[in-house]
Amino acid sequence: MNKKRTYILSVMTLLWTGFIFSMSLKVGEESGQLSGGILNIILDIISPLWENIFGPITAEGIEFFHHLIRKAAHFTEFLILGVLTYLLSLNFEKLKFKWLTALGYGTLIASLDETLQLFVEGRAGAVFDVCIDFCGAFTGIMLVALFIKIRGNFYGKGNRKLKEK
């Protein structure tokens, strides 16, 4: 076990968990303004192309994009959490089912996060959001596992030509 790497990943995981909770503590209006600002940036970029192909973006279209951005934020927050927790779990040699431990942590934080939102003005906890968070954490874990597998195949016993040089 590399103690320095374990310490750094532990701190990063706790800080990211804190960030997730801090985003959930924002009242509904503040949270909406934040995602609305991101929506405006995206609309500035895609509007010209969209309007050339499909015509003007309707109010329903804007609301759909806003909803999509909010759900993408959930997914992305937990994708990063999945990456961090899985990398952290890899530092514990005796830990069995490392990916399951990381996924369990992500699911626990997602559940606590949505429960926390029940107590914040203008926010609501949603089981669907826990599912999105779960998928984000799972994707993050799988990306790390895939990266490790590809790296192992490239640098490991699967690439004899590289070793001969």
Image (tube, rainbow, N blue to C red):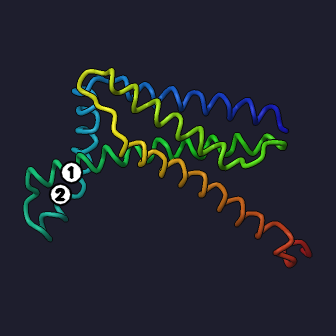
Residue 125, position as x, y percentages in the image: 34, 33
Amino acid on which disc 1 is placed: Asp
Residue where numbered disc 2 is placed: 47
- Is disc 1 surrounded by few (<14), some (14 to 19) or many (20+) residues within 10 Å? few
> Between 122 and 83, which is closer to the camera in this rendering?
122
Residue where numbered disc 1 is placed: 44
Image quadrant in which the C terminus is located: bottom right
Under tag 2, what secondary structure?
A: helix
Residue 79, position as x, y percentages in the image: 51, 47
Question: Residue 93 appears in which quarter of the rendering?
Answer: top right
Residue ID at (75%, 45%): 90
Residue found at the far front of this picture: 127
Q: Are marks 1 and 2 in contact (CB under 8 Å)?
A: yes
Q: Which mark identifies residue 118?
A: none
Residue ID at (59%, 41%): 104
> Between 128 and 15, which is closer to the camera in this rendering?
128
- Is disc 2 surrounded by few (<14), some (14 to 19) or many (20+) residues within 10 Å? some
Image quadrant in which the N terminus is located: top right
